[in-house]
Image (cartoon, rainbow, N blue to C red):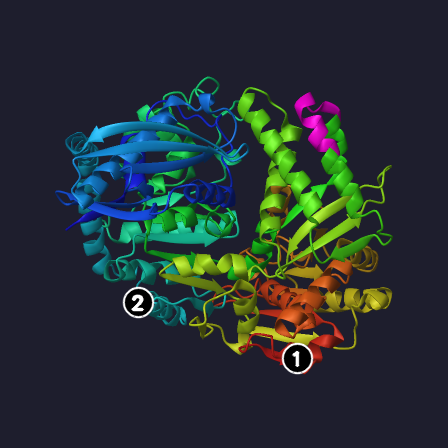
Amino acid sequence: MKYTVAVRELTEFTAKQGDLDLRFTPSPSAQEGIAGHAVVTARRAAGYQTEVSLSGDYRHLTVRGRADGYDPTRNRLEEIKTFRGDLERMPANHRHLHWAQVKMYGWLMCDKLGLEEMRLALVYFDIASQKETVIEETHSATALKQYFEEQCGRFLAWAEQELAHRNASNQALTALRFPHASFRPGQRQLAEAVYRATATGCCLMAEAPTGIGKTIGTLFPLLKACPGQELDKVFYLAAKTSGRGLALDALSLIRKSEPALPLRVLELIARDKACEYPDKACHGESCPLAKGFYDRLPQARSAALVHGAMGKEALRTVALEHQVCPYYLSQELARWSDVVVGDYNYYFDTSAMLYGLTTANQWRVGVLVDEAHNLIDRSRKMYTAELDQTEIHFLRQSAPAALKKSLDRLNRAWNALHRDQEEAYRVYPEIPLKFTTAMQQVIADITDFMAENPTHVDSKLQRFYFDALQFSRLAETFDMHSLFDITLKADSRRADSMLCIRNIIPAPFLGPRFEAARSVTLFSATLSPWHFYCDTLGLPENTVCVDVESPFRAEQLSVRVIGKVSTRYQHREESLSPIADLMARQYEAKPGNYLAFFSSFDYLQKVLELFKVRYPQITAWEQSRRMEETEREQFLARFTPVSQGIGFAVLGGPFAEGIDLPGERLVGAFIATLGLPQLNPVNEQIKERMGAAFGAGYDYTYLFPGIQKVVQAAGRVIRTQQDRGVVYLIDDRFGRPNVRRLLPAWWKVES
């Protein structure tokens, strides 16, 4: 059996050495890198070959990759690297790695063409000055072959270990049995759908009610499909920490149920949560865990993989035992893990690591997206950029002299944008070239300054820099999927404004992510209507949609519409009394724990104040604004099997989804809102854009997202097949046919 590895992956394994050093950063963006390569290759003579596919074998190792360029007339193979700043500041271990890559390509080219020697060149292209620095060496084919075989030999022991691991894993996965005695109702249907989608290589959207065990019901069939579909990785992506925790628990159960299963499970966490020395910079002269990082990495990597279950704490323990950075150890381990559990952004964001590794290494991956109804809002945020003009003024006061001129030029261009704007908020059809040019100059100047002054620390400058980078990159792809809007700041002493490239339809950005995977399964209790999610997320045309059978019976949940009450803003005051009385009547009829959801904190407070005055004998507690994690835990801790009372919360907040209060911990919910997003100029612009794109502006902007929140909140009541409860939908609009159609089919709604 052959083990296939990319040149870049192999050399990063064998040729990286010394310190972890991020000082010669930031590197150019992907677009700048592509553009830089294009500039270099365009300068070459006729006959110059680009993106040359190469492949070669050493024993049972196949090495493949694409060389940047080859000039047959000069017999010169080139590796092109784009950069910013002073090339002399590049750490020696970076240059060492670059030479390793070009030497590997050199032998593969000699072998392909039957050459006796090859001129190799590292071409460093400064994207700011557009100048090339070429470092050239001539090597014999014999020497290059020897180098190639040395690197392959160093990697081969690891490759043999990986082949053995893959064989053992495939055998165990083929024989893997479901870790429970039987499937829950609906769970088998979900599992079979996931398995078929993986086998046929299509995307799957599965609406599956809470309580059927969606986590293990998706992980188990995908793991079973790995051997037959030759999947390299499984990615489990969640919107929240709780979702990652459920996935890790399910994987732990699967591993325990099959002792022979050598499954490597990695949890990815954010850099700020993994950093042991947040006050230090990421290089060997500052952080002790960066010093000699690549020299100690092999031992740390091996130790972590032997452990197998690489959750946050286990990974931290291994990292500190070997004195390496936990965060960057986890980045390395993503290459060698079977299952990676992390946030959405690791695959769907602009610079998503898992997506980048998948495309670079041509992995076959299966992706699971938990609570996928969250993906629309999360993706919009990933592809949105906002800039505050006030920051320019503060930055100008403390900025180094080298940056003041370009900052002033940017501020003038910024002022010109909204000079004629009278209204507080306006959408513009395009981003003026003069402004983007000024922005790019500021970015270039800050980049050069940071590269030349690696020890300079200025958090405000760095924050603005990264915000500007995101804005500039999104400006390059600006189209009808996004809005460019300007909001004048009423609280500013100057005529300052906020600029925003606001993504509305993430489909163009997410589409390539779906295409790169063998299969993607998106699952949630609320994915209706299908076309709303398919359109906005950019799912492939062959996506399969499955409505999983509910394990619950209609008699378990009493759903009652209160049609004589309006929760519209203009009717709020009139609604307070009937809502408070309704809650009290239900509580007195069946004392227990209830959740009451409202559209805003102001609305919540008004009902709560009246409720406490009229019914002081009923215990009530509330969600407050900007609750800390400990406060949220205290709120939930009041829902016990023996407690009684009503918790007041905001729909769409942390208590409206993702919490589990089975049995007597929660017996009912009052939902006093249709959940519609706020009516404001931004949402009205979104409605207009959605209408132009899909012909259903109101539904896509207001109705579908609103009802999704309602159904999620109602889903807190029935969690197991033994639960019974009641949900009150308080608003006359819940009686409308177009709203009723969006409610779960298994509900029996009473008016």
Q: In this rendering, does residue 301 appear at all? A: no
Q: Which amino acid does label 1 sit on?
A: Asn
Q: What residue type is labelled 2?
A: Ala
Badge number at residue 199:
2
Name the secondary structure under disc 2: helix
Q: How crowded is mark 2: few (under 14 residues within 10 Å), some or many (20 or more)?
A: some
Front-most of 645 and 469? 469
Front-most of 165 and 458? 458
Does residue 615 appear to the left or right of 540 in the view shown? right
Give the percent coordinates (x, y) of residue 166: 22, 49
Front-most of 500 and 271? 500
**The magenta stretch spans residue 121:** no
Give the label, 2 or 1, closer to the camera. 2
**Residue displayed at 74% across by 28% down:** 396
Give the percent coordinates (x, y) of residue 116: 16, 35
As drawn, 301 above or below 532: above
Name the secondary structure under disc 1: helix
The residue indicated by pointer 1 is 738
- Region rendered in magenta: 397-408
Give the percent coordinates (x, y) of residue 617: 76, 56
